[in-house]
Amino acid sequence: MPRSILFRAAYYLVSTFFVVTAMPLLLWPTRRPVARWIQAYCQVMVWLMRHIGGIDVRLRGLDHLPDGPFIIASKHQSWGDGFVVFAAIPDLAFVTGGHLLNYPLLGPILRKLGAIVVNNCGGVAARGRLMAEEMEKASAEGRSILIYPEGHLSPVGTQHRYRKGVFHLYEKMNCPVVPVATDLGLRWPQQSAWIVPGPCSVEFLPAIAPGLDKECFMAELEQMIETRSLSLLHDQAAAGTLPAAIVPSIPTPA
């Protein structure tokens, strides 16, 4: 518990520092300075996770990242998995909910970063047009895009329905999709204030090439992410590093 308290204190102090000091960078005509600053923030957060929180994050599969723009479709178990991915990949665009734009300091930073905002206002057609415009902008700039296909944080060993937005990105951009599996939720569960020191992984899987139809693409993406994420949990169980309270809730492999 003392480690969790120290980590949370460091998390809020560092986050406040980086958000406040990012404000002058918003005046710069391009987004590059603020993008580099936010990547530095994510790298510091990964350092805090490891050295204060005791979370030994193992980043795997970087050799699976294609040349040129690509889409990252990631399992989302924790705030921490976003930090790990952003720390590793520069100038990454990402899909986010419109509610985040309402925060006084966070909203301007997200706009400057070129976040692809999925807003609930204006109906499906209006949302689709706006999202397509932002996608085209990111693609024209040669940026890769991060999306969470489930649209939710998922507790360890569970999943939500995979949404079709990731397929529309895949079809529109005509570029590879890199699935990401993780078991980081073991160590920093969802939005919890408490952490559990120990090893975990964020793993880039082999890319799905462009050209699949919707049914094939969605089935392959879900199978790759969920199978590997579950496999990571069973690897931890075999190594004796799985928290005891988690063991009964982990599904048996098919």
Image (cartoon, rainbow, N blue to C red):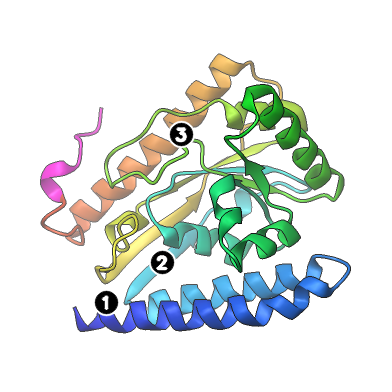
Q: Which residue matches tag 2?
A: 57
Tell me the quarter of the image containing the N terminus.
bottom left
Q: Nearer the viewer, residue 243 or 126?
A: 126
Q: Nearer the viewer, residue 170 or 160?
A: 160
First reached walking from the N terminus: tag 2 or tag 1: 1
Q: Viewer-proximal residue, 83 or 133?
A: 133
Mark 3 surroundings within 10 Å by alpha-carbon count, few (fewer than 14), some (14 through 19), many (20 or more): some
Residue indicated by mark 3: 224
Q: Which marked residue is nearer to the observer: mark 1 or mark 3?
A: 1
Q: Does the magenta segment cover residue 253? A: yes
Please state the horizontal and vertical placement of residue 150, each as a whole percent of the image: 45, 36
Q: Quadrant of residue 207?
A: top right
Classify 244 as above or below 66: below
Q: Looking at the rendered structure, which numbered label has been put on residue 4?
A: 1
Image quadrant assignment for residue 10: bottom left
Q: Amino acid at mark 3?
A: Met
Q: Is residue 170 visible to us here?
A: no
The Cα atoms of the two marked residues, 3 and 2, are separated by: 20 Å
Q: Is residue 124 visible?
A: yes
Q: Which mark is residue 15?
A: none
Which is nearer the N-term, disc 3 or disc 2? 2
Q: Amino acid at mark 1?
A: Ser
